Image (cartoon, helix red, strand yellow):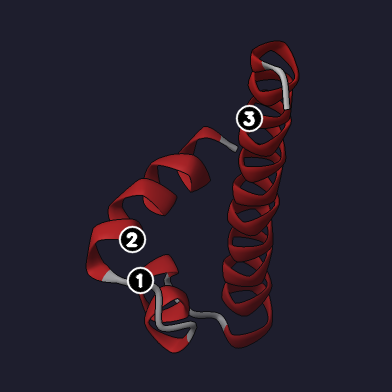
Amino acid sequence: MTRTLESEVQSMCNLSKGIEEKGRKEGIISSVKNLMDTMDWSAEQAMKALKVSKEDQEKYLVMLKKQ
């Protein structure tokens, strides 16, 4: 494989990882919102039910506030 081709493959892999991560975050946010609406739970309760790690909970709280 040439260096140029190898670089392009690496770039595509990084792009697909970014897309995957974005989709995962959007799915978690959607699930949290659904639990908040249907169960009348706080965001913290919803994330606990979804087993979102403590470290990630802070990140998702910020994302929820922006929406």
Residue identifier under label 3: 10
**Looking at the image, is mark 3 or mark 2 earlier in the sequence?**
3
In the rendered picture of this protein, how many numbered marks are placed on residues? Answer: 3
Do residues under tags 1 and 2 come within 8 Å of each other at their CB atoms? Answer: yes
Question: Which mark identifies residue 64?
Answer: none
Instruction: Tell me: 66 left or right of 39.
Output: left
Mark nearer the viewer, 1 or 2: 2
Question: Residue sitting at 72 percent across and 41 percent down?
Answer: 16
Question: Residue sitting at 67 percent across and 25 percent down?
Answer: 6
Image position of 59 with respect to 11: above or below: below
Q: Which of these two is toward me, 3 or 11?
A: 3
Mark nearer the viewer, 3 or 2: 3
Q: Residue type at mark 2?
A: Gln
Q: Which of these two is toward me, 15 or 6?
A: 6
Q: Secondary structure at mark 3?
A: helix
Question: Residue sitting at 63 percent across and 30 percent down?
Answer: 10
Residue identifier under label 1: 44
